[in-house]
Amino acid sequence: MTDLGDAINFKDIAEQLNALNLSIYTPSLYLFDCARSGYSIDYDGEGLSIDGREKGLRKLMATNLLKRLESSVNSFRLTLNRIHEYIRQTMELIDAYDKKYSGATIDVSSFTDDMDSSEGDTDPFATKKSKISLADMDYVSWRRDLEADFERLDLLLLMLKDITPEHDSKLQMLIGDLKHKFSNPINGENKKVLIFTAFADTANYLYEQLSTKIKETCGLDTALITGSTDGRCTLPKFPMSFNNVLTYFSPLSKDRLALFPNATDEIDVLIATDCISEGQNLQDCDYLINYDIHWNPVRIIQRFGRIDRIGSRNKQIQLVNYWPDMELDDYIQLKGRVESRMKATILTAAGTGNPLSMGEEADLEYRLGQLKKLQNEVVDIEDMDTGINIMDLGLNEFRLDLLQYVKEHPDIEHAPFGLNAVVAGSELAKPGVMFVLKNRNNAVNIDRKNQLHPFYMVYLADDGEVICDHLHPKQLLDIMRALCKIKTNYDRALCAAVNRETQDGRRMTKYNTLLQMAIDSIVSIKEETDIESLFSVGETTALHGEIKGLDDFELITFLIIKEK
């Protein structure tokens, strides 16, 4: 992490983070018993209730700190400063209340920290206000816990103070790799480099530290793209925009000649977040650096796919991954320990539970296995193990999408059940229908295999083939996300086709049949589980309720996929 001999290291910092309680995000845990009913506090809540948002924010911020630490010292330091300042302001508010006993309230959603989802730097938790009155809280205990975190953050910031860019070993390694690439191109005189990072803070840091030096020493131009801005570039009088940056970086694949016939300058180094990790052809470049390692192994492959494309004129391409400054097993286990700690207080309040669910433990094992594989070879998505589906993006990312959508469309909770939409099929999704159902009882989710229980998602082809069953929600959500997220308007032609097919919704025989087949597939999988359990150790699942079919579910929504 640094060449300073007496400086703190990655593992030491991680252990300090593990000791944080992050109570700044969970004020509802300090409510008096007599006041909880007024806030609808449910310690098992996972939705958009006060406690659901608090627990989600606390867990995401804990893991986010680890991710930022692995990304760059600068990004980590900025985040620590933000949290440090928010705690300071909150303690001052408590102290002022303690003197005057005026009606002060705490709003947990007032602090924002960009999670850098691939769509930009948004505030995923500023959906609804989570105001809690200090008069209803044991604010003395809360302040004590806040102060403990404040002092620990003080210590961390002090120990990081001496790690300047000159002593940032990771940054200096990047500078060395760039110098070697520029001096020893692997395809003729191609000096193009694409640098990926998960965080806008890190991207900005790299641009500020590298762009001027690269221009002055090598005569090459550098550009920056994040999800929140059109970008920055060292080319003078450059027509700045997201698409123009990509076009000047990869002029052949982007057919720049048709757009800028007189342009001769090019961008040789592009620093970007995952806002360009999908759907962009940048194969003029032959050298990609993952400055930080995304915890989702599929995202790493998607990044490499920007330059590893059919039509590339490069005879060879190179992928460089910057791995954490510790053993990968320890790194993944840290994530598990942090998540366990963030849940421990909640589980203590509820009096039940294992800190990490079976699904979360399996998820960590999966990520460890796939990341280890990526340490030694470049892997195609099709070649990856499917213990947890290869299209896994992590449910937290979908939750961020949901929270952002609710922020923009606050009346969504009033939407009736049974709404549907239609989108065009693609290579990723063949024609059919995706059903979202809700189970009326708890009998189906045997062994807690369905991560979305009591909701069930099933994707069937038009002929009834089950393309994705309810036990693989991440794969289905990923496909749905790819089909729908970029759409802002409905497709009139497709809607007209569905209206003709169903006579404006009066003849839904085809989709009623497919719905029954979807439910039959859920019941069938349960019956298979029942049979398997008869021959396994422990209580049989065959004794856990009877599923009759359609009456056990209600239809929430469905998505029709049709050929264009």
Image (spheres, grey):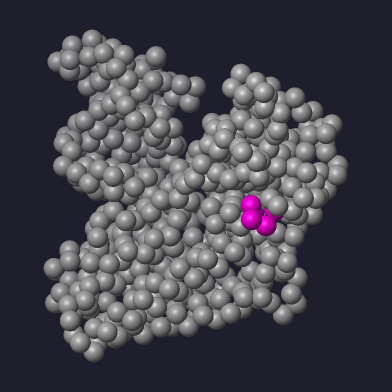
| Quadrant for the C terminus in the image | top left
Outermost residue, front side: 237
Q: Which residues are magenta?
A: 206-210
Q: Quadrant of residue 414?
A: top left
Is the stretch drawn in magenta largely helix, strand or loop? helix
- Count the marks: 0
Q: Is residue 219 visible?
A: yes
Q: Is residue 549 visible?
A: no
Q: Is residue 544 magenta?
A: no
| Quadrant for the N terminus in the image | bottom right
Q: Position of residue 176 (x, y in %)?
A: 79, 54
- In the drawing, does residue 119 fall left or right of residue 525? right
Q: Is residue 465 above or below residue 126?
A: above
Q: Quadrant of residue 556?
A: top left
- In the drawing, does residue 470 fall left or right of residue 19? left
Q: Position of residue 412 (x, y in %)?
A: 22, 42
Q: Residue at x 17, y 77 (%)?
A: 103
Q: Residue at x 44, y 79 (%)?
A: 149
* Residue in the foreground of this view, choosing between 545 and 432: 432
Q: Is residue 316 above or below residue 366?
A: above
Q: Position of residue 206 (x, y in %)?
A: 64, 54
* Residue in the foreground of this view, choosing between 197 and 200: 200
* Residue in the foreground of this view, choosing between 70 and 391: 70
Q: Is residue 518 above or below residue 407?
A: above
- In the drawing, does residue 232 fall left or right of residue 516? right
Q: Is residue 25 above or below residue 263?
A: below
Q: Is residue 207 magenta?
A: yes
Q: Residue at x 59, y 64 (%)?
A: 74
Q: Residue at x 61, y 57 (%)?
A: 205
Q: Position of residue 471 (x, y in %)?
A: 39, 40
